[in-house]
Image (cartoon, rainbow, N blue to C red):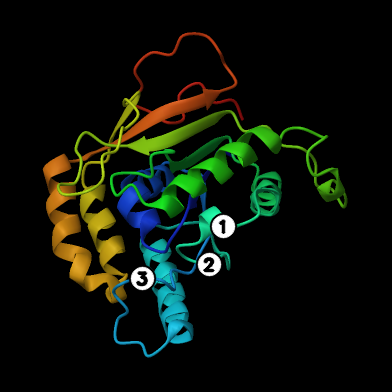
Amino acid sequence: MLRMMCITAHPDDEAGGFGGSLRLYHDRGVETCVVCLTPGQAASHRGGTRNDQELVAMRRREFAASCEILKISQATVLDYPDGQLHRQELHKVVSELTLHVRQFRPQVMLAFGPEGGVTGHTDHSMASTFATLAFHWAGRDNRYPDQLTEGITPHRSQKLYFATANFVLPERQPITLSPATAVIEIGGYLETKIAAFKAHTSQAPLWPLFESHVRQRGTRELFHLAAHTDISPMPQETDLMAGIKE
């Protein structure tokens, strides 16, 4: 079976950055997985919660609701501190993600680019770094060999894509986006993507800005092919699963 894994930083990233494609590929028969590194406890918008613990519980529920709309096969929120991914011990985080890759065994992985997406968020940049290392290291038996027990074996994913865009947000620090090498037509799944983002009710103040930008972008999600086991020249793609072998 074809499998796709998306590694994100915060609850709502799965919808805002990748939602249309995740639901599109589910409906094409691809098993999908999202691993979110933080529960989003440092968010500016807190949904009326009184403390971080209440916000974490709320955002975990919202993440589950969003993933239900997107029909995610496996959805996991880890416990790294929101806003502090740059302070985490790299090998520890990559080890945990590598284990998730070896267990789920995706052919395709999705992540933010190292610039941090259109927001330039530091956590997004670090999630990109961790995901990229996990993509490369999960297939090597000399990386985290202690994991290779009880049927767990190295797994070499075939493609790594970074989400990218054809616009930037005004009044933000400058970012340099990766060029789009894959343009995915999501069609009616644009409405599904918006609905999944709005499942994050604690983030309701962001809904108008998010919706205006994704409608401006239209029914396309853009990706940059960052790594591929096939090193021959790549054409412009319209399918993230193009060339994948089961």
Give the residue at x 50% y 48%.
126
Give the residue at x 13% y 62%.
208
Crowd around label 1: few <14 · some 14–19 · many ≥20 (10 Å): few
Q: Given the image, on which type of amino acid does mark 2 rest?
A: Pro
Res 113 label:
none
Give the residue at x 68% y 46%.
98
Q: Given the image, on which type of amino acid does mark 3 rest?
A: Ala
Residue identified by numbered label 3: 43
Identify whether 238 is placed above or below 69: above
Residue identified by numbered label 1: 87
Q: Position of residue 92 (x, y in %)?
A: 70, 54
Give the structural element (helix, strand or loop) at label 2: loop
Q: Given the image, on which type of amino acid does mark 1 rest?
A: Arg
Q: Is residue 21 left or right of residue 141?
A: left
Crowd around label 3: few <14 · some 14–19 · many ≥20 (10 Å): some
Give the residue at x 32% y 70%.
200
Q: Is residue 51 left or right of residue 168?
A: right
Mark positioned earlier in the residue sequence (2 or 1): 2
Res 81 label:
2
